[in-house]
Amino acid sequence: MDKGQCCGCRGCEDVCPVQAIRFYRDEEGYEYPEIDGEKCIHCGRCRSVCAFREKEPEDYGGTAFYEFQAGAEDRRKSQSGGFAFALSRAFIERGGVVYGCVLDEGFRAVHIRASDMGTVERMRGSKYVQSDMAGIYGALAKDLDGGREVLFIGMTCQVNQVFKRFGGRRNLLLADIICHGAASPRLFQEYIQYWEGREGRLLGYCFRDKGFGWRNAHIETLVFQKRRKSSDIWASIYYSHHSMRPACYHCNKTVHHSDLTMGDCWETGGE
């Protein structure tokens, strides 16, 4: 397949009526679909559901709003203004659920479901690596069909795919993040292994540590048993543009199906 035309959202896998599609990891750690020719019934649903194929730009004709979470502690813990956390808290307090990205115990970026603030807390912070969406569509369908209010936060390609699958539901709010690209999960795992080979088992990781100041926000912090280390190595790798998923170089960022778009508001008159 043309890897430049697949963002790894797993939407095709979700809609296949005969489970003929499975995802495999390539040498860079990215996931791609593989079709079992013996199971496939050639219904075409996998192609029709692919949001990445949408190429027509949209005319927004809307108004831009700038917002940040006023609480100093929430801003400090978050990597931007804390708006995603504030929005998530509003959904949880109303009895809703939130879908977002966390780093799991193995420091893999994965999308999970949160129905309590403890789980939402794990979603705080930027993750400069692609997240795994395995199992998310089924959980979304169950919550939406059950009438729960749902907030989904992800990259534009992930949000577009959720919209393609569930768009029009009144109990679904989609929020995408201004994205610079999806870095290789395998490369990030090898990066973690590099540090563990030097310092021992990694206990905690932050992609952007605000303790170094807002203007130095791309300094990472790694927590080991005996010490904390700071580095800008991963940021250098990420912004070198050599670690991105092939589809990121073909992304049509003008196609947005989100209700809200979030990102850093640099140079807007204040911090």
Image (cartoon, rainbow, N blue to C red):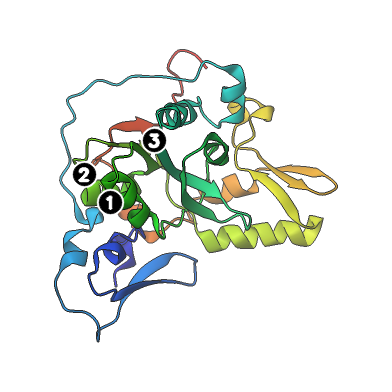
Residue in the picture at 78% in, 42% down: 228
Answer whether residue 252 is visible to the viewer in this image. Answer: no
Label 3, on which residue? 96
* Three-letter residue code for mark 1: Gln
SS at mark 3?
loop
Task: Of the two numbered discs 1 and 2 on the same chain, state the one appearing first in sequence.
Answer: 1
Q: Position of residue 163 (x, y in %)?
A: 25, 46
Which is closer to the viewer, label 3 or label 2?
Answer: 3
Q: Residue furthest top?
A: 269
Asked if the residue under mark 2 is in contact with the one under mark 3, i.e. CB atoms within 8 Å, the reply is no
Q: Is residue 192 left or right of residue 119?
A: right
Relative to 235, say whether 20 is above or below.
below
Q: Which mark is residue 167?
A: 2
Q: Residue furthest front?
A: 146
Q: Position of residue 63 (x, y in %)?
A: 24, 20
Instruction: Please name whichever residue, 56 or 25, is drawn nearer the observer in this view of the structure.
Output: 25
Q: CA distance from mark 1 to mark 2?
A: 9 Å
Label 3 CA crowd tier, 10 Å (few <14, some 14–19, many 20+)? many
Q: Position of residue 36 (x, y in %)?
A: 29, 81
Label 1, on which residue? 161
Instruction: Please name whichever residue, 113 or 32, is drawn nearer the observer in this view of the structure.
Output: 113
Residue in the picture at 45% in, 27% down: 93
Task: Of the two numbered discs 3 and 2 on the same chain, state the one appearing first in sequence.
Answer: 3
Q: CA distance from mark 3 to mark 2?
A: 18 Å
